[in-house]
Amino acid sequence: MLGPYHEAFGQLVEDSIWYDSIVEKIKKFNVKVKEIEIKTNPENVNNVVGHKKENIKKLKELYDLDVKIKQVKTIRPGKFEINILKTYKDFLDE
């Protein structure tokens, strides 16, 4: 008998690695972020979003973070950039 099986297992692992990288970059901002924009090559959008939108859901649930995704062809495949659109300070000042 084989171990657990999931037809998208490789994708799940890759998505998890992308999620960890995104969270690591967010933590380096050293500010409570409310809304971000993640720019990535169109070929990596699925990795950023995650299988069944899991990465976006986790960012919302764990960090109360709104995420916008922008496809940018000039960003090299495998890379991404994060821009802060709104911090909690901005949010509270409104």
Image: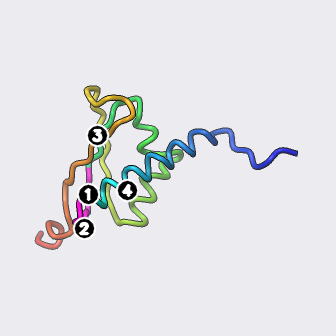
Residue that badge 4 annotates: 23
Q: Based on the picture, tell me whether residue 30 belongs to the magenta stretch.
A: yes
Taking the view exactly as shown, the residue that stands out farthest to the top is: 73
Which-is-in-front pick, marks 1 and 4? 4
Q: Of the two numbered discs 1 and 4 on the same chain, state the one appearing first in sequence.
A: 4
> At which x and y percent is residue 60?
39, 61
- Where on the picture, by quarter, is residue 11? top right
Query: Label 1: how many residues lie within 10 Å, few (<14), some (14-19) or many (20+)?
Result: some
Is disc 2 placed on a helix, strand or loop? loop
Label 4 to label 3, Cα distance in Å? 14 Å
Q: Of the two numbered discs 4 and 2 on the same chain, state the one appearing first in sequence.
A: 4
Q: Which mark is residue 13?
A: none
Contact check, label 4 and label 2, Cβ < 8 Å: no
Residue that badge 2 annotates: 32
Residue that badge 3 annotates: 39
Label 2 to label 1, Cα distance in Å? 10 Å
Residue drawn at 49 percent across, 52 percent down = 54
Amino acid type, label 4 = Val
> At which x and y percent is residue 72?
27, 31
Label 3 to label 2, Cα distance in Å? 20 Å
Label 4 to label 2, Cα distance in Å? 12 Å
Query: Label 4: how many residues lie within 10 Å, few (<14), some (14-19) or many (20+)?
Result: few
Q: Of the two numbered discs 3 and 2 on the same chain, state the one appearing first in sequence.
A: 2
Residue that badge 1 annotates: 35
| Left or right: residue 75 compared with residue 87 | right
> At which x and y percent is residue 27?
31, 61
Residue drawn at 30 percent across, 45 percent down = 38
